[in-house]
Amino acid sequence: MIKTARRINILDGYVITQIWTSPRELADDSVGLIEENRSGQASGYSNRRSRNGPHGSTKIRLVNRSKSSQAPGPGTASFFSDLGKFRRDPLGKFFEYTLKFGDVVRYRGLWITHQITNPEHILHILQTNAANYRKGRDYKILRLSLGQGLLTSEGRLWQRQRRMTQPMFQSQQVASSIGIMTEAARVMSERWRHYSCEDTAFDIVPELMRLTLTIAGQAMFSTDLEADTEAIQEVLQVGREFSVDRAWSVIRVPHWMPTSRNRRHQASLEKFRIIVNRILEQRRGTPAPPHDLLWQLMAARDENGAAMPEHQVRDEVATLLTAGHETTTLALAWALFLLAQHPRILGVVQQEIAFLNGRTPVYEDLSRLKYTRNVVDETMRLYPPVWVISRTAAGDDAVGGFHIPAGSEVLIFPYITHRHPRWWTEPERFIPERFASESSRIRGAYLPFGAGPRTCVGLNFAMTEVLIVLTMLLQRFRPELAMSPEDVKLDPSVTLRPTPGIRMKMLRR
Ligand code: HEM
């Protein structure tokens, strides 16, 4: 068979090669486009059959996906020898490997893992072919801390829980939590006002943790968790260390074995259990409970009229508390960090919120905070609180022309796709304006809340909370960094945290 090939374009550093064997192949759905990096190494296939580029719309073919091949990647020996570097700097190392090997990178360690960077491929895994993917190994580790809540459960259990929980996060319900958000932000601002009077610099991360935990506790469970903040932060810290250690361990000892790491983790879980149990007991003793999320969970009945088992309610409460506050904290913290370094952008936000004349924002004001929303979007592009999303392939699949065998781990890094020069111009710069037009977004290239059926259930709640709190803080303060921005490092543990924290002064406006 004669293969014809020609290089048609050099785009964003990629050579695109057209190959065809027959006119019929050009019409064949199972063919794709070969992209090579400058060194000529094939780096990925796409299933697009046409592409609009400087050469016009071109039918492109070429690799029969049914004959999908093994994706490129480091050899097993070199992967193992680099393991220490991956652990020290996972973001840098995975970024380096996608630039070196392409959109689909195969790692062969004790198990097979594929790293996926291309937005089309990401949507294939998270959305179009989501039925073929279970939550990945990282979530199995998380299950040891959170049980079988919405974040970690699968199949029918997940479907039932999602159906029940989702209505509580719709706009109307979120709107009814605005008062809780504004009151918590007001209380925190009072505290910050004292710091500013004393010209004190402080780490904003624990402060924001306290705020978001208070909001989550009151909005979802009508309970005050302010006094539990330190205990919960410690529990999360132990959980983070446990999960990261376990994720990188070659040998995973069973969780029941009394190693010092397991014992420490179990002890912290026990503390968390006590807090969660207290929330449930308080509720049982309330004669006319509010119709909040906890009420919903406790009142739910399955098709046989049975209530949700107590352990399931506990797992959902623990999951929503954890998932519902740390991520929001980080979005707020990174936004303040960036705004402090970009006075022009800060000025535009301050102009936008000036229409409030200093009054507390209400739900209807949110639609006018367009630029502020762009700032939040751009913050989560640069610093996605969830920096990695993992899945396990249940059956064989082909992604971008490469074979993904059943059982392979699949890693998607919002952090890397969000900063990849192929999909973003000046990816390292903070440019909120890039989000001004919805159409400028490439589908799948922006996924701070994930995509597909397992998209974040708290998206509305989180965006509302971040916008409201940010607006109230910027009405009152001008954030100023009290440390060099270079000293704020990324700590990609379970979430993308700043380390050693973000020390700031909040100057009164
Ligand atoms: C800025 C804040 C937030 C970010 C960036 C964020 C991000 C994410 C992401 C990326 C996922 C998908 C994970 C995956 O596909 O494996 C997710 C799922 C989830 N999030 Fe969020 N989240 C945020 C806030 C919240 C809030 C406020 C809540 C609850 C109050 C929440 C609860 C959940 C739950 C329960 C899931 C699992 C959903 C499911 O699998 O059905 N999140 N979140």
Image: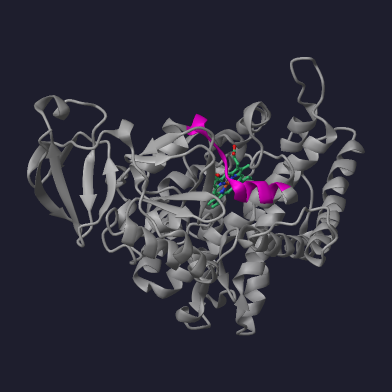
Quick one: quadrant of the N terminus?
A: top left
Q: Where is residue 153 in the image (x, y as percent from the top left)?
A: 66, 37
Q: Is the magenta stretch mostly helix, strand or loop?
A: helix
The quarter of the image that holds ligand 1 is top right
Does 72 appear in magenta? no
Does 141 appear in magenta? yes
Q: Where is residue 330 in the image (x, y as percent from the top left)?
A: 56, 61
| Residue 413 visible in the shown view | no
Which of these two is toward me, 338 or 90?
90
Say whether residue 286 is left or right of residue 492.
Answer: right
Give me the residue at 24% from left, 27% from top: 29
The residue segment tinted magenta is 130-143
Quadrant for residue 394, please give it: top right
- Residue that protrudes farthest toward the top in the picture: 304
Say whether residue 406 is left or right of residue 355.
Answer: right
Q: Is residue 343 above or below residue 285?
A: below
Which of these two is toward me, 196 or 127?
127
Give me the residue at 46% from left, 61% from top: 383
* Tally of numbered tags: 0
- Way the structure is coloured: one colour
Q: Is residue 338 above or below residue 44?
A: below
- Residue that protrudes farthest toward the right in the picture: 285
Q: Position of residue 17 (x, y in %)?
A: 15, 47
Q: Where is residue 169 in the image (x, y as percent from the top left)?
A: 60, 37
Quadrant for residue 58, please give it: top left
| Residue 173 visible in the shown view | yes
Which of these two is toward me, 369 or 41?
41
Give me the residue at 63% from left, 52% from top: 181
